[in-house]
Image (tube, rainbow, N blue to C red):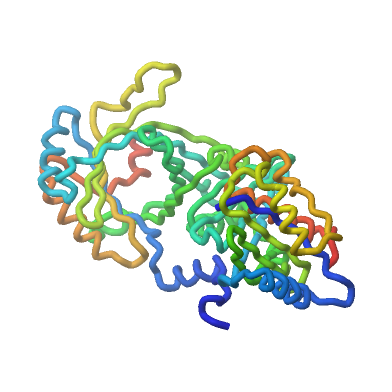
């Protein structure tokens, strides 16, 4: 796996998410990409019982790119602690149902087609929360490199070529402090969580 | 849409499918016993003769286990116990997070203790994660010994040590080895209990493997 950048794509007024996905699909196919299946990233969040003191949130995420793993991020105050576990972690969360309850209505996912183009892997995701369309997230991965700093320029150029020059492309917040570290799958998960949280808070309109 | 481009199945769906098909090994069948240090060599010799992995010799292990408890917020149920195991002799291996339910001893016709169990391999900052989750450390110990296999059965012969405060060598908790015979299996595979009982009988009189009732042990310690 390589470095991944997750970028939100603004859906123009009077247009639907499907229209945007189709438009970007045409563009990426024109570049010579081939579709390689579909992808899915989902996130469910659990809140601690009020009697346990300060509210803590456990986010449980799955990524079809790593189908045997469960990613769990515990948000407590300003600190985020993550654990990567095998699939049975989901069963453990059921055992913790007295302590942590799921906020079902905020279950959110991004899914759509997955393309490969040489060393790049591109995923066009439509984000839905409770079946409601929320927006479009584009994931671009450059697979031969694991250091964000070394590949950021290339990824920015690729994204701008795909999305158009008017789209501002900044390094994701999560990556800023980790530009010189080795990139791992949890870094992609943190980026999804950042975007999902923004959609949940209603900070973004589709 | 071609099958190659079919939408991936969600993690929740694949988990409920696995639950429905009853393929998740979430029950532990267990027999326990102990043997004095002076007699352990004889038992190891017997196990070497009976078990599958004889060519390479018995597998050794050296683990540290920390037991956490998570109190019920409504104070109604018993605290939830979670155990974290780390291999001290293979430090790059993942942590093992383990949930163990209440042991069910059943009547005297049931050959083994049965308890629900979830074994989860974890990487990352597990100890810190559990602390922040609200768990409290109850106790910790290290356990060092040998592991044998016989079909689906796992046999461990191991010594339990206190965790040393300084750089002192770890101090053993007793003058004996703990012997455990266990199988992890999906629900309802009770026939394995009979196999375990038959295997335990072959180890007599070197070690007597039995259903151990912790509640009674706790009671004995108080009185």
> Looking at the image, which is closer to me, B87 or B163?
B87
**What is the total number of numbered labels drawn onto the structure image?**
0
Q: Residue furthest bottom?
A: B1
The residue located at (84%, 61%) in the rendering is A204
The residue located at (40%, 59%) in the rendering is B26
The residue located at (78%, 67%) in the rendering is A135
Viewport quadrant of the C terminus of chain A:
bottom right
Could you tell me residue B144's position as x and y percent?
Answer: 30, 33
Q: Is residue A58 left or right of residue B87?
A: right
Q: Is residue A5 left or right of residue B15?
A: right
Could you tell me residue A48's position as x and y percent?
Answer: 67, 50
Q: Quadrant of residue A94?
A: bottom right
> Looking at the image, which is closer to me, A44 or B215?
A44
Q: Is residue B5 above or below residue A65?
A: below
Q: Is residue B94 above or below residue B188?
A: above
Could you tell me residue B118's position as x and y percent?
Answer: 43, 54
The residue located at (42%, 52%) in the rendering is B119
> Looking at the image, which is closer to me, B8 or B144?
B8
Q: Residue furthest right?
A: A13
């Amino acid at each position: 796996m390589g470095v991944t950048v997750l970028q939100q794509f603004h859906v123009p007024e009077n247009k639907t998410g499907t229209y945007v996905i189709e438009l970007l699909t045409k563009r990426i196919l024109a570049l010579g990409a081939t579709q390689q299946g579909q992808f899915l990233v989902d996130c469910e969040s659990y809140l601690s019982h009020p009697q346990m003191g300060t509210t803590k949130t456990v986010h449980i995420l799955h990524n079809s790119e790593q189908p045997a793993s469960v990613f769990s991020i515990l948000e407590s105050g300003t600190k985020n602690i993550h654990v990567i576990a095998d699939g049975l972690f989901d069963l453990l969360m059921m055992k913790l149902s007295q302590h942590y309850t799921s906020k079902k209505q905020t279950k959110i996912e991004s899914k759509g087609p997955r393309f490969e183009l040489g060393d790049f892997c591109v995923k066009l995701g439509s984000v839905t929360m409770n079946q409601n369309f929320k927006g479009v997230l584009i994931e671009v991965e450059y697979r031969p490199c694991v250091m964000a700093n070394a590949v950021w320029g290339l990824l920015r150029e690729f994204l701008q070529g795909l999305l158009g020059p008017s789209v501002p492309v900044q390094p994701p917040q999560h990556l800023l402090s980790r530009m010189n570290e080795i990139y791992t799958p949890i870094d992609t998960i943190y980026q999804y969580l950042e975007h999902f949280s923004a959609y949940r808070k209603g900070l973004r309109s589709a | 849409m071609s099958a190659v481009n079919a939408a991936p199945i969600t993690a929740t769906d694949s988990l409920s499918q696995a639950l429905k098909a009853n393929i998740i090994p979430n029950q532990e069948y267990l027999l326990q016993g102990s043997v004095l240090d002076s007699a352990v060599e004889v038992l190891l010799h017997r196990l070497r003769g009976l078990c599958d992995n004889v060519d390479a010799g018995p597998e050794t292990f050296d683990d540290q286990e920390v037991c956490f408890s998570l109190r019920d917020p409504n104070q109604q149920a018993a605290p939830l116990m979670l155990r974290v195991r780390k291999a001290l002799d293979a430090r790059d291996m993942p942590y093992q997070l383990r949930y163990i339910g209440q042991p069910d001893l059943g009547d005297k016709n049931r050959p083994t203790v049965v308890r629900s169990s979830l074994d989860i391999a974890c990487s990352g900052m597990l100890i810190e994660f559990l602390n922040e989750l609200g768990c409290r450390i109850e106790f910790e110990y290290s356990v060092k010994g040998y592991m044998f296999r016989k079909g689906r059965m796992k046999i461990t012969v191991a010594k339990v040590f206190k965790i040393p405060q300084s750089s002192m060598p770890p101090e053993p908790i007793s003058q004996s080895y703990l012997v455990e015979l266990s199988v992890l299996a999906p629900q309802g595979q009770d026939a394995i209990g009979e196999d375990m009982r038959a295997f335990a009988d072959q180890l007599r009189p070197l070690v007597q493997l039995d259903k151990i009732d912790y509640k009674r042990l706790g009671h004995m310690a108080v009185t």
